[in-house]
Amino acid sequence: MAAPPPHRIRVVCRLRPADDAAVEVRGASLIVPKNRSVRESRDELPAQGGLRFGVDAVYDQSASQVSVFEGEAAKLVDGVVDGVTGTLLAYGQTGAGKTFTVLGRGGTASGAKYDDRGLVPRCLERLFATAMRKRRSGRVVDVRLSVCEVYNETVVDLLRPPPEKGQPVGLPVVERNGLTEIKGLEKAPVASAADALQLLYDAEINRAVASHAMNCASSRSHLVVTGHVVCSHGEDVTEAKLTIVDLAGAERVNQTQSRDGTATLREAGYINKSLAFLEQVVVALGDDKPRLHIPYRSSKLTHALKDALGGTCRTTLIACVWPSAAQADQTRATLRFAARMGRITCAPVVGRRRSASEDAASKVVARKLRNEVAVL
Ligand code: ADP
Ligand code: MG
């Protein structure tokens, strides 16, 4: 399969239900009421009665889980089996519907009238169905799952039970062959979607225990679920991953302290610091003048997501919005971030693993070079 052409990060918006919805949807644009005290930025276009934010698609309150999956995730899953890494990020304030979108809410019983399962279980099902089709055409498909939580600067493996006493062990983020990975993270082999869902269930229990030990509410940590797929057909081996991230709550506080003690409204700051670093990376990547240094290493979250941001994969941001009038400030902040994200371009590539014979050939070359250097 040829590498897909470069593309902008896809940015879509999902609205949760609200009785007093103040956000208006016009096609793929959202009109959010204006607030005089907040400085307007170039991401916002004034519209009658508010500010207009354009995105690639809007899923309004009536959108079902299946429509979000089919519109945003199904293609990414198929791409992963063909060797193109895909990332789905759910972003937004606490209560805006990130976990509902990513994991869903109960309702897994077959034949349920309204199926509320989120993206992760649906992606896993599609992944195994696609893998099965590939296997029928003679390919070998290996699927592994990893689940981790990033809380402050600690990455916790949720497929390993946390220690009975004390804090969970934090894992380092490293770069290998130009790709980032979390060193020591369990990649559990999974044979079916049911297998994977059982592991996710265990991970949720481990998360509750780890969060308790670290004294963190789940809305303050990022959940990262990754499916690693290796697909081989003879010597041709592709390798890719699908990463789905339920980000921490993106709420902000208005810092009203100034040096002389008078209350002045400054740029609102995130409660969760790693999101501020994520925003810095997004701003740097979306800059009109390309920057040489992108501060990926400034936090564990941005470092772990390096490949997913401005890298070699397909990325979709789902901006979750709580359209209530009382949440308008947070909604504007969420959509401003989404607009910045939408300016980033990625150049997806097919991830190829070198075949055994290529590996052997390169070892021979390396040995030859070493010998030549030794002679010199
Ligand atoms: P977050 O993870 O962003 O903090 P949640 O996903 O926990 O938010 O959503 C908050 C509440 O709103 C939950 O009770 C959830 O079930 C409900 N909710 C969110 N989005 C939707 C939706 N699209 N349809 C129905 N209920 C929703
Ligand atoms: Mg949540």
Image: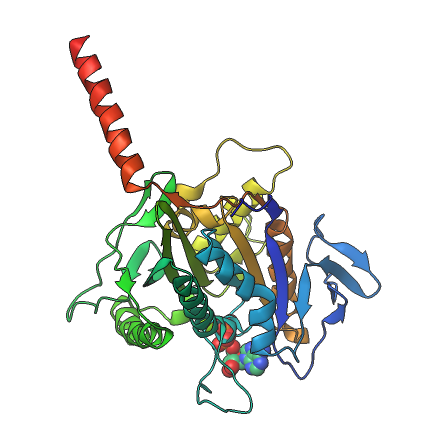
| Scheme of colours in the image | rainbow
Whole-percent x, y for residue 234 in the image: 35, 49
Of residue 144 and residue 302, the one placed in the foreground of this image is 144
In x, y percent, where is residue 31? Answer: 75, 65
What residue is drawn where x is 46% and y is 89%?
Answer: 110
Check the image and report above or below for 192 versus 8: below
Looking at the image, is 69 positioned above or below residue 89? below
On the picture, is 197 further left or further right than 112? left
Whole-percent x and y of residue 310?
52, 44
Picture residue at 53% right of the left edge, 50% below the top: 279
Q: Quadrant of the C terminus?
A: top left
Instruction: Report the side of 192 relative to 106 (left or right).
Output: left
Q: Is residue 107 above or below residue 283?
A: below
Using residue 345 as the reference point, say whether residue 372 is left or right of it.
left
- Tell me which corner region of the image, top left, top right, bottom left or bottom right, holds residue 61: bottom right
Q: Is residue 108 visible?
A: yes
Q: Is residue 254 visible?
A: no
The answer to whether 111 is drawn above or below residue 239 in the figure is below
Residue lying at the far top of the rendered structure: 376
- Identity of the residue drawn at 38% across and 55% down: 231
Which quadrant of the view contains residue 175? top left
The percent coordinates of residue 115 (x first, y second) are 52, 85
At x 59% / y 51%, what residue is drawn? 9
